[in-house]
């Protein structure tokens, strides 16, 4: 009953370092995505995946890399961290709500600070 | 160009009264709309949705209205409760099956005062 699990919850990086944000879901959802949320702004789509082995870019993909080797996992890699990537990152998967709608289930978020 | 706009960053209402949160969109290809609620330090959670074939959808205290000609939707919460205090995001997508590619507004912070 975990839903979408993100790790770590908090991370501080120095400019130029790389890291991976982990995301796992246990609902057997085919669709998974990564969003970032900056202060006073909405959620912007970084990358998404419609199934294992298939990924595509969203609205703000630069500086990030993803892969989808299994249905459950969708890690987000920061290749060379920059201060502009300081943000809260949300992983989400898509299922079917009780109304028949396709709704996103979000993780609790990963707060990243790049110094 | 922001395709989904929530022009009120914040809203404060008294407990028991109605809360009305507004959302405007510009892309005429959007035909599916969702509202999410977000508490601090948590991820957003789905609240209610509406498709373009309807002009109203109700779920308990929450009702969403859609005016396609005006490209406007609103979320009504009646009666408002202190536990409703959260950030509310409006989201839109061109097709139900693309709800995962929803475009989000910047959110409205609702404060319900006891």
Image: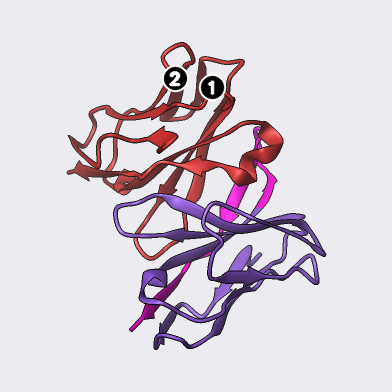
Question: Who's the residue at 48% across and 53% down the image?
Answer: A44
Instruction: Please tell me how crowded label 2 is: few (under 14), some (14-19), or many (20+) other residues with Cα within 10 Å.
Output: some
- Image spot of residue A24 (x, y percent): 67, 70
- Chain A shade in the render: purple
Answer with the quarter of the image where residue A68 lies.
bottom right
Answer with the quarter of the image where residue B30 lies.
top right
What chain does badge 2 belong to?
B
Mark 2 — residue? B71
B59 sits to left or right of A49: left
- Numbered range of the magenta stretch: A94-115
- Chain B shade in the render: red
Residue B18 vs residue B75, the one in the foreground: B75
Question: Who's the residue at 62% across and 31% down the image?
Answer: B94
Q: Are marks 1 and 2 on the same chain?
A: yes
Q: Earlier in the sequence, mark 1 or mark 2?
A: 1
Residue B27 vs residue B90, the one in the foreground: B27
Outermost residue to the top: B69
Q: Is residue B80 visible?
A: yes
Residue A103 vs residue A51, the one in the foreground: A51
- Report if residue A114 lies within the magenta region: yes
B37 sits to left or right of B11: right
- Check if mark 1's residue and mark 2's residue have beta carbons within 8 Å: yes
Mark 1 — residue? B28
Q: Quadrant of the N terminus of chain B?
A: top left
Question: Who's the residue at 46% across and 61% down the image?
Answer: A36
What chain does badge 1 belong to?
B
B94 sits to left or right of B104: right
Q: How is the image coloured?
A: by chain
Q: Secondary structure at mark 1?
A: loop
**Which mark is on residue B105?**
none
Answer with the quarter of the image where residue A112 lies.
bottom left
Q: Secondary structure at mark 2?
A: loop
């Amino acid at each position: 009953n975990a839903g979408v699990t993100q790790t770590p919850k908090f991370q501080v990086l120095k400019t130029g370092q790389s890291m991976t944000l982990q995301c796992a879901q246990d609902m057997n959802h085919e669709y998974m995505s990564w969003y970032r949320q900056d202060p006073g702004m909405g959620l912007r789509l970084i990358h998404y995946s419609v199934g294992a082995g298939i990924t595509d870019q969203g609205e703000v993909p630069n500086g990030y890399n993803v892969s989808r080797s299994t249905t459950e996992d969708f890690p987000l890699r920061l290749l060379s961290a920059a201060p502009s990537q300081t943000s809260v990152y949300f992983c989400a998967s898509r299922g079917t709500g009780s109304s028949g709608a396709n709704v996103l289930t979000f993780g609790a978020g990963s707060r990243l600070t790049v110094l | 160009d922001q395709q989904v706009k929530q022009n009120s960053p914040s809203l404060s209402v008294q407990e028991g009264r109605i809360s009305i949160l507004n959302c405007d969109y510009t892309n005429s290809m959007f035909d599916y709309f969702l509202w999410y609620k977000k508490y601090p330090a948590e991820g957003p959670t789905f609240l209610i949705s509406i498709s373009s074939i309807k002009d109203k959808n109700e779920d308990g205290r929450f009702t969403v209205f859609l005016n396609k000609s005006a490209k406007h939707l609103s979320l009504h919460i009646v009666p408002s409760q202190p536990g409703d205090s959260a950030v509310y995001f409006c989201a839109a997508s061109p097709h139900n099956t693309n709800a995962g590619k929803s475009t989000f507004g910047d959110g409205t912070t609702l404060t319900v005062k006891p």
